[in-house]
């Protein structure tokens, strides 16, 4: 029998549905202790100075060239569902930020 790309993909498709790859167990997810949310979070930085460099164009308009932010205050992590302060998990949050 000649194996064409069509027969090969059909075989792989069958194998995929019969033996789905197991999802690896992850034990290091941040879970809100108050509401159980493990998906939606937000971070708030206090006392931030943002410096933006602009160039003025010939027609008088401005184009931003670069910006730089300096955070002078605290950075806090919150649950976006119930607003609980989860700053104790912020280090873990930063380590898992990709
Ligand atoms: Zn919550």
Image (cartoon, helix red, strand yellow):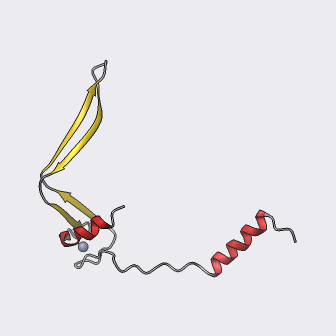
Left or right: 17 in relation to 31: right
Which residue sits furthest right? 1
Residue 97 image offset from top left, x and y in percent: 33, 63
The residue shown at (73%, 73%) is 11
The residue shown at (30%, 34%) is 65
In the depicted structure, whether residue 80 falls above or below residue 55? below
Q: Quadrant of ligand 1?
A: bottom left
In the depicted structure, whether residue 44 falls above or below residue 66? below
Left or right: 11 in relation to 2: left
In the depicted structure, whether residue 52 falls above or below residue 80? above
The residue shown at (23%, 72%) is 89
Residue 95 is drawn in which quadrant?
Answer: bottom left
Residue 8 image offset from top left, x and y in percent: 75, 69
Q: Quadrant of the N terminus?
A: bottom right
The residue shown at (27%, 27%) is 55
Residue sitting nearer the eye, 32 or 45: 45
Which residue sits furthest top? 58
Numbered marks: total: 0
Residue 16 is drawn in which quadrant?
Answer: bottom right
Q: Quadrant of the C terminus?
A: bottom left
Residue 60 image offset from top left, x and y in percent: 27, 20
Which residue sits furthest front? 95
Residue 73 image offset from top left, x and y in percent: 11, 56
Left or right: 20 in relation to 64: right
């Amino acid at each position: 029998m000649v194996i064409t790309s069509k027969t090969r993909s059909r075989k792989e498709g069958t194998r995929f549905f019969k033996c789905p790859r197991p999802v690896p167990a992850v034990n290091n997810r941040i879970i809100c202790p108050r509401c159980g949310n493990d998906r939606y979070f937000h971070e708030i930085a206090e006392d931030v100075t943002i410096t933006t460099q602009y160039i003025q164009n010939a027609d008088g308009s401005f184009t931003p060239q670069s910006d730089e932010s300096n955070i002078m205050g605290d950075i806090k992590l919150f649950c976006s569902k119930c607003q609980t302060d989860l700053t104790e998990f912020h280090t873990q949050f930063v380590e898992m930020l990709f």
